[in-house]
Amino acid sequence: MTASREIHLAARPQGAPGPEDFSLVEVDVPDPGDGQVLIRNAYMSVDPYMRGRMNDAKSYTPPFQLGQALTGGAVGQVVASRNDRLAEGTWVVHDRGWRELALSDGKHLRPFDPSLAPVSTTLGVLGMPGLTAYFGLLELGRPVEGETVFVSGAAGAVGSVAGQIAKLKGCRVIGSAGSAAKAAWLEELGFDEVFDYNETDTKEALRDGIDVYFDNVGGSTLEAALAALRLRGRIVACGAISQYNASSSPPGPRNLFLMVTKRLRMEGFIISDHYDHFPAFSADMSAWLRDGSVRYRETVVEGIENAPSAFIGLLEGENIGKMLVKVGAAA
Amino acid sequence: MTASREIHLAARPQGAPGPEDFSLVEVDVPDPGDGQVLIRNAYMSVDPYMRGRMNDAKSYTPPFQLGQALTGGAVGQVVASRNDRLAEGTWVVHDRGWRELALSDGKHLRPFDPSLAPVSTTLGVLGMPGLTAYFGLLELGRPVEGETVFVSGAAGAVGSVAGQIAKLKGCRVIGSAGSAAKAAWLEELGFDEVFDYNETDTKEALRDGIDVYFDNVGGSTLEAALAALRLRGRIVACGAISQYNASSSPPGPRNLFLMVTKRLRMEGFIISDHYDHFPAFSADMSAWLRDGSVRYRETVVEGIENAPSAFIGLLEGENIGKMLVKVGAAA
């Protein structure tokens, strides 16, 4: 038995989540049984999609259960093993975050070599968010050299990568974000045009037209993008963070009929359907990181006790780049 | 010179068009010049898309001009020719409807053999609406045997064909329409389930789920279809007749985020981009008509002077199957 701390869902948030919706719970984690490993988490990931799992609603992943530890992406090291394939000391990415120590049956783990890149990148630019950007942009957005790609939520873990890949493919890239600091970073990354949506009207910012819209935010930004899309434009429906905290669904875009007149295609995806693209992604992204053509940032919150505030902050746009919680040593 | 009558756009309709928005004008049509032909129209087509062209708004086709004859699909016979390729007596489909006599430079005409099928079918099941159904369903909807296909506006020229093609592909087909008479006809055509949307809630009618939605109407029906679509469902964005007369755009579907969670694809199209599919369509549809696996109906209004009321009625759903105006002899 080893003492550990984990974050439980104490209540289902109504609208924006608050600290009272989470509880920090001390538990004793059993020693690994046959085939099991004990993982000490180094970082856990907080991701916008988790907000949906806090509702008691049927969706593509089952809802989190009240009074139980939340789950999510995490990276850590095997500290005790009764599994032949996973020696002590092995670094693994897994889905049992929101806790210091995770007991695993050894399935659904991805071991990796920690000497290749900082371990935290397995949750960001080299992990699920990076693959989301890579697959969504290239397979669904299908940008062609010379086209204009608009990315909303562009300073987030997914958006910042999607924009940089679009640049690598020879596109003009427009990014929107919610602060001057985020906009400044996107300019550093080489986005051709960047605007703070609190300061600039999105329709005005897109007045010259776009060919691909990588949608991370939904809402009125989608309506503006529909208006700006050129003939045969594509919408990559990746997320709608502007709406995740809404307690009732706001109306959709008034101009959806432009899908017909402009021959647009909109396609949604959930990245877990497409992990078969991971090897190609991993090879490309590792090369792009090495040669500096893709860069990333992380916003790291220290201590698992601060995971709820990290998550609340994520939904309020407090992060630049990937939002992570450094779990720290517990055992 | 030959006397002819044509329908002009007298005013741009505000909301639903009325008789005052059209005028019947007598004109003298010049004799054909070099390369020209004079066509006596037998039937002209009234189609929902024409409503958009009555607004002074940029779209995929230029707006109709005030005080000039409207244009649109028509079928007629060459009655005078100074074009070597188009002898007198040749039957042609062309785009100079809304008039009794049409002078043409001989371009953008499609000659056809009138012995193969009633000439009116070149404007319906064997023409643009048929191709719209064929291309939209097969290329964008991509129905798979055993799937459920929902068609709205199912008793119209496009919807009735889309539903029958879906049946031919081994799908279960649900159709919605706006009257009991329409519903009865769709049952005759072999639709598996039919409902009158004035009597039955669309969400309730789709409660068992659908895989493909062929959308002719937009609005709240699209919202209900989004709710009913299964994982990886497809929306063929063909039309939105429920909204064409709206003077301001109503809000879009509140549940558009289901595009992401259910991995849906929505694609719009304009059939004039896809006339390269005409030969394959024509061969398939002719065979289906011959063996009785596709059937059609026409609602024929007599006399060009009644074309405005035919069009107004089309937008109010007065037609079953293809709405046509029989132009009749004028010369």
Image (cartoon, coloured by chain):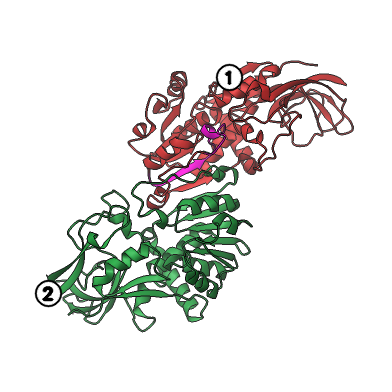
Chain colours: A red, B green
State yes or no: residue A235 in magenta. yes
Secondary structure type for disc 2: loop
From this viewpoint, is residue A115 visible?
no
Q: Residue at x 49, y 30 (%)?
A: A153
Which one is nearer the viewer's eye here, B100 or A47? B100
Which one is nearer the viewer's eye here, B102 or A158? B102
Q: Tell me the amino acid under the disc marked 1.
A: Thr
> Residue lying farthest bottom?
B115
- The range drawn in magenta is A230-249
Using a 10 Å C-alpha cutoff, classify the residue at mark 2 as few (fewer than 14 neighbours), some (14 to 19) or many (20 or more): some
Circle 2 is placed at which residue position? B31
Displayed quadrant of residue A51: top right
Residue B240 at x, y = what percent? 42, 55
As drawn, B55 above or below B132: above
Q: Tell me the amino acid under the disc marked 2.
A: Asp
Displayed quadrant of residue A98: top right
Tell me the distance, in whole angstroms, between the alpha carbons under discs 2 and 1. 78 Å
Secondary structure type for disc 1: strand
As drawn, B155 above or below A29: below
Q: Which mark is residue A299?
A: 1
Q: Is circle 2 on the same chain as circle 1?
A: no
As drawn, B323 above or below A176: below
